[in-house]
Image (spheres, coloured by chain):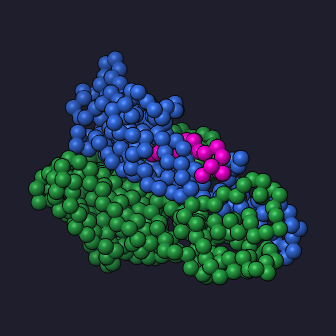
Amino acid sequence: MTITTPTGVGISNASALWLPAMAQEPLKTALQNCNYLMQWHRPPLVSHCYTADDALTRTSIYIVPIIPSADSLRYNFEHRFVCSAGSQSVTVTVDETASYTGGSTTWANIYSQAVTSDATGGNLTTHTKTLQAIASTSEALRITYTAPASGSRNDHHVLTYPAPAATVAGLMASGATPFDDGLLAHADKGAVHTEWLNRCKATSSAVLRDRKQIALSFVQDETNQTYQHNSLGSDYYPLPIARVWLPNQGPVCTLDLRVLASVDAGGYSDLIRVRQAGGVPGAASTTFDALGGVESSTLALIMQGDGLMRYADIEIGVARLGANKTRLKAVSGYYTPGQ
Amino acid sequence: MRAIHPKNYRSVDMTSPLTGEATPPAAAALLLAADEWCVGAAVSPYAGCGHVFDGLTASGLARRYLAAVIAPGAVHARAALSRTWEQTTAVGHSATEHELWSSDSGSTANELINVPGKQAGVGYTPQPTFQYGASDIVLSGDGINDSPTASQDRQLELQTLAAPYVEPLYVGDVSAFSLFVSDQVLDLETL
């Protein structure tokens, strides 16, 4: 019995599906695509462009709320930054926590690595770290970049996407089940049973729903925010509107939102608002406390456009109370197919 | 010839089995449905993430490098670019056009994609800002020209593969950005 995982999605000819032969195919290809999805369905978990000061000469720390896979998968990380001087050493560290509580948070290290920036100052440095496991219980990642010895650093983007290990037998926590070809490929040709057919849907659906897709992102430094919202009235002041694309989905889709914000003192209730923008009738909004921990809620989106161009415009707003600063540190919005 | 059949996961039951019968008739439709679930999941484009960030208030922030993971079967992509401004005298970093490129679309002069920027109107100059301003969103061009002889506003080329891959990107002078797959392979059998 062999679990075969194709490196590309297997496509059976249309004719083979409509006029199937009394043979292993095309069912075998469909079932092997279950294995393919388990290893190769790779929607990003993190895709955040940093909002930070220009020309940083200090260490930066970013906290990114996440909803990782229930299967505690391995992920690949790609970090993009620019150093003004060539060949600078920047140490990139990624930690995870199951409960973010500010300075008292207990962090578990995922990896730490010294990276030499591009030999030419001002050029992009891309640092890739592959196959790093993120626990299913993690609530947030901490990403740290140290200061270069010479010149400055501009932080651009972090990308994290699944890179699971080879598929193994058994039911995963996500509900996905791989296929081994033992019975189907046996010389005596076992009978086709309905579980094989149902497994195609069950595993596809489980993988789709387990690997949340980042759909909205914002992050700035944990303690040195560029924007602290310290000169506002009590109304919500909007950040730039972003367009979120959910191809072919709707008419209503719901994002899972995670927000991290704090206040220096005083009231903290409902100081962060996320809403659908664009004057869409019936558009929803949701608010979050700036309590210093990761807050959770959902936002229903009335999708606009058609086909691949299905979208919703989203606005993040920040309010403050009195003279107390409101520090918005991160927003992560996740799309789950079917939700 | 096998076309992509887009699946709207909001309109289907994600949890019930394909069939509840122990011995269903050997219908091709059942086999097709089973196959379509796996193939559909593989080639459905991932969510086009709306990235909010300050790429406007200093010249050092204007160039933004990022990357996207592209699902199998994609051919072209377009982008949504947000601009945020106040109508005062310009002192920040402003541009008459937004540059855009991806690794596969190309980054040499003729391959650059130029999306028209926010233009000064009568009586005001748009000053880029990140908060407290007004925002609008412009889409990159819908024209397809994979061999341009001059920079223009057009769709980005993507790799049409049977597995997902990472597409490096660059965009200039925006306050939010998202990428979406605008064109998929016509015949899956060519993947």
The residue most toward the left is: A150
Q: Quadrant of residue A59?
A: bottom left
Quadrant of the rendering where the N terminus of chain A is positioned:
bottom right
Q: Is residue B174 depicted above or below B145 in this figure?
A: below
Residue B183 in picture, x, y percent from top left: 57, 42
- Whether residue A290 appears in this view of the structure is no
Q: Residue furthest right?
A: B25
- Residue A267, above or below B173: below
Residue A276 is covered by the magenta coloring: no
- Let me know if residue B125 appears in the view: yes
x and y, in percent, of residue B154 in the image: 47, 32
Q: Residue at x 55, y 41 (%)?
A: B182
Q: Nearer the viewer, residue B78 or B4?
A: B4
Front residue of A44 and B55: A44
Residue beneath the point at 28% across and 41% down: B62
Letter of the chain in blue = B
Residue B181 magenta-highlighted? yes
Q: From what the image shows, is residue B153 above or below residue A69?
A: above
Decide which of A307, B119 is in the foreground and name it.
A307
Q: What percent of the width, then of the height, locates residue A233?
A: 32, 46
Q: Residue at x 16, y 57 (%)?
A: A87
Which residue corresponds to the image point at 37% horizontal and 75% vertical from the top-left?
A97
Q: Quadrant of the C terminus of chain A?
A: bottom right
Look at the picture and state if A286 lies above or below B109.
below
Q: Which residues lie in the magenta part?
A: B178-191
For chain A, give the colour: green
Q: Position of residue A16 (x, y in %)?
A: 77, 58
Which residue is nearer to you in this view: A166 or A283?
A: A166
